Each structure stands twice: as C-alpha cells, then as structure tokens.
C-alpha cells in the first residue's frame, strides 16, 4: 500500500546488495512512497550486478562508494545532489561487515587489524558519511538520517563477536552527531535496532538459524522482516516523525523487553 508520504523527498540509500538486503526493500518502499534517490554500495559489491536491477526498477542511478573513503563519500554526496536536483532529505546507512566473523575468529582471540577494518566499515563510516553531509551542508532542514543496528549493542549474543562493539559505537555516533545535526541544521539522526533477518550479512553470523528461531519464539509479535524494517524506515524519513532524534529505536516485535516467553519456558518444562 502506498501513501505517497515521501513525495518530493530526495536521498541516498547505502547497502543494497541483493533482494534480501534490508536496503533493497527500503529502496523499493521509498520509491513506492514517491521518494527519489541514488543507490550506493562498495565498488566490490557492484560487481555482483544485482543492484543494477534495483536501479532500473526504481528509476535511480548508482554511484559506487566505499563508505570508509572520505573521497568516495564527497564524490557521492556532490553527485547525488546534482542528479537529484537539490539538497537531500533522507539517508539510509545499511552497512555492516566483520572480518573476524567472516573468518571465524573467536571474540577471545581477535585479530585487531581485522577488528579495525570491521569498525571502520560498520561504525566509523556512519560518522564519515555524516561529517561529509554536514560539511557540505547537503541536508535539507527536517531531513532524516537512519542507520541500522542490532541489540547485541546492549546484550550479549556470543556469536555476534566484535560486531556487538561496532554496533555500540554506531549507536553512540547517532546520539553524538544527532546533537550537532539537530542544533545546527534541524536534521534528525536515529538508529533502528532490527530483529535478526535472513540476509547475506545476517547469515554470516554463526548459528544464525537458531538465533532467528529463538527470537521468533521470544517476540510477542514475532520477528520483524526486512520489509517491516523498510516500512519503519519510510516512516522515519517522513514528516510524521519530525521530532524523533538521537534515539535507538527497537524494531523487533517486542523481543527487547521480554525476559522469557511461554513458548521458551514450555521448552524447558518436563512432560
Ligand atoms: N540481517 C540481520 O539480522 C540484521 C539485524 C539487525 C541489523 N542489521 C544491520 O542491517 C544493515 C544491513 O545489513 P543486511 O542484513 O541488509 O545485509 P546485507 O549483507 O544485504 O547488507 C550489508 C551491506 O553492507 C555493504 N558494505 C560492506 N562494506 C562496505 C563498504 N566498505 N562500503 C559500502 N558498503 C559496504 C555490503 O556491500 C552490503 O550491501 C547492517 O548494518 C546490519 O548490521 C542486520
């Protein structure tokens, strides 16, 4: 269903890799709601080609950018404004990667140069993106910047590894930069803390299937899907949420406030 709530709004969407990506679903929903945007991803992800399909479907252009490179980000922000014909109203940061997770390195035995790489890609890239947007004065007043995060920033999920620390850092950046973006430019900055979702990044986490079924049984409303997340993000880009800023917004079917559910208890009760 479309309400046209993003009519006339322009933005940048990072992180659509394939049709399972949360950013992919968000791009489709933003398009349906009347928004126009530029798609971006790391040059290496571009080679997989699927993003071109999304660009065709949503009448959008693609500008490759490694989100850890200030030069790439500057080029992206300048070109996006040229293509879209003005300043931006929304930005989605949907980027995550841990080399330690990918290579199966245990949290008690981290390779720190891999940790630094993962931190740069998953967390610092959010600061870099906002710093470029801020310095170039590229956001319209009442614009909205959203990054995606996970509850491992607050609670331990052992296999989430150093991504937990990256997410904690990411959420802190949203608050710290949100203060200055709010005061100086009237732009809001938030993180959405999403349920486990079957995507390339999600499935990279060891034991992901157990993880997703457990969350499903613990959440009164069940896990939020990628499409549900896209819908929530659309609302955060709209004018209906203008005064929400510097928040970490749980989008998880209630999981984060449940101690235990009946379904999980039943599992442990002897017949
Ligand atoms: N899938 C889940 O269970 C889940 C849950 C909560 C939060 N999230 C978060 O949602 C976001 C999107 O992930 P997803 O689940 O859609 O997976 P995904 O694998 O589809 O998306 C991750 C994206 O990050 C991009 N990326 C990696 N390195 C980059 C770089 N240097 N520059 C630019 N882009 C780069 C990848 O190309 C990819 O498009 C991530 O921040 C992730 O941590 C995911």
Image (cartoon, rainbow, N blue to C red):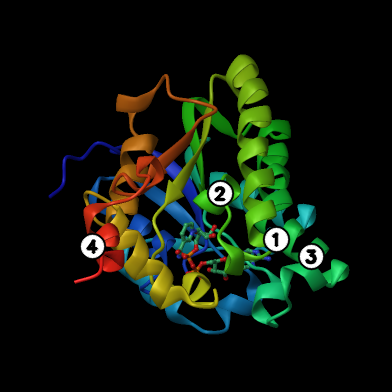
SS of the residue under disc 2: loop
Q: CA distance from mark 4 to mark 2?
A: 23 Å
Q: Quadrant of residue 185?
A: top right
Tell me if residue 153 can be seen.
yes
Q: CA distance from mark 1 to mark 2?
A: 22 Å
State whether label 3 is within 8 Å of ligand 1. no
**Residue that mark 3 sits on:** 115
Tell me if residue 52 can be seen.
no
Between disc 3 and disc 1, the foreground one is: 3
Between disc 4 and disc 3, the foreground one is: 4
**Residue that mark 2 sits on:** 155
Percent x, y of residue 196:
41, 62
Tell whether 46 sits left or right of 128. Answer: left
Query: If you read the primary sequence from the N terminus, does the residue marked by circle 2 or circle 3 appear first?
Result: 3
Residue 105 vertical position relative to residue 174 in the rendered view, above or below: below
SS of the residue under disc 1: helix
Query: If you read the primary sequence from the N terminus, does the residue marked by circle 4 or circle 2 appear first?
Result: 2
Percent x, y of residue 107:
73, 68
Residue 9 vertical position relative to residue 240 in the rendered view, above or below: below
Q: Residue at x 48, y 30 (%)?
A: 143
**Residue that mark 4 sits on:** 266
Residue most extreme to the left:
1
Q: CA distance from mark 4 to mark 1?
A: 41 Å
State whether label 1 is within 8 Å of ligand 1. yes
**Residue that mark 1 sits on:** 121
Query: If you read the primary sequence from the N terminus, does the residue marked by circle 4 or circle 1 appear first?
Result: 1
Query: If you read the primary sequence from the N terminus, does the residue marked by circle 4 or circle 3 appear first?
Result: 3
In the rendered image, the quadrant that contains the C terminus is bottom left
Query: If you read the primary sequence from the N terminus, does the residue marked by circle 1 or circle 2 appear first?
Result: 1
């Amino acid at each position: 269903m479309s309400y046209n709530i993003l009519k006339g709004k322009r933005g940048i969407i990072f992180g659509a890799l394939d049709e399972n990506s949360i950013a992919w679903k968000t791009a489709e929903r933003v398009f349906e709601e009347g928004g126009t945007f530029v798609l971006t991803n790391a040059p290496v992800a571009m080679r997989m080609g699927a993003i071109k399909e999304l660009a065709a479907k949503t009448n959008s252009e693609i500008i490759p950018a490694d989100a850890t490179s200030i030069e790439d980000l500057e080029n992206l922000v300048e070109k996006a404004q040229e293509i879209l014909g003005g300043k931006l109203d929304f930005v989605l940061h949907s980027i995550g990667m841990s080399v330690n997770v990918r290579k199966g390195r245990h949290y008690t035995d981290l390779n720190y140069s891999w940790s630094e790489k993962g931190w740069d890609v998953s967390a610092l890239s959010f600061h870099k993106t906002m710093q470029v947007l801020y310095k170039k004065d590229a956001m319209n007043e009442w614009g909205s910047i959203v990054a995606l995060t996970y509850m491992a920033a607050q609670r331990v999920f052992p296999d989430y590894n150093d991504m937990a620390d990256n997410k904690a850092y990411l959420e802190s950046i949203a608050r710290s930069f949100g203060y200055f973006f709010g005061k100086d430019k009237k732009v809001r900055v938030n993180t959405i803390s999403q349920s486990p979702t079957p995507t390339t990044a999600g499935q990279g986490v060891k034991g992901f299937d157990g993880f997703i079924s457990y969350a499903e049984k613990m959440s009164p409303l069940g896990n939020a899907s990628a499409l549900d997340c896209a819908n929530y993000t659309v609302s955060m880009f709209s004018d209906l949420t203008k005064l929400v800023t510097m928040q970490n917004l749980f989008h998880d079917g209630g999981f984060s406030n449940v101690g235990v559910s009946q379904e999980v208890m039943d599992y442990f009760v002897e017949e």
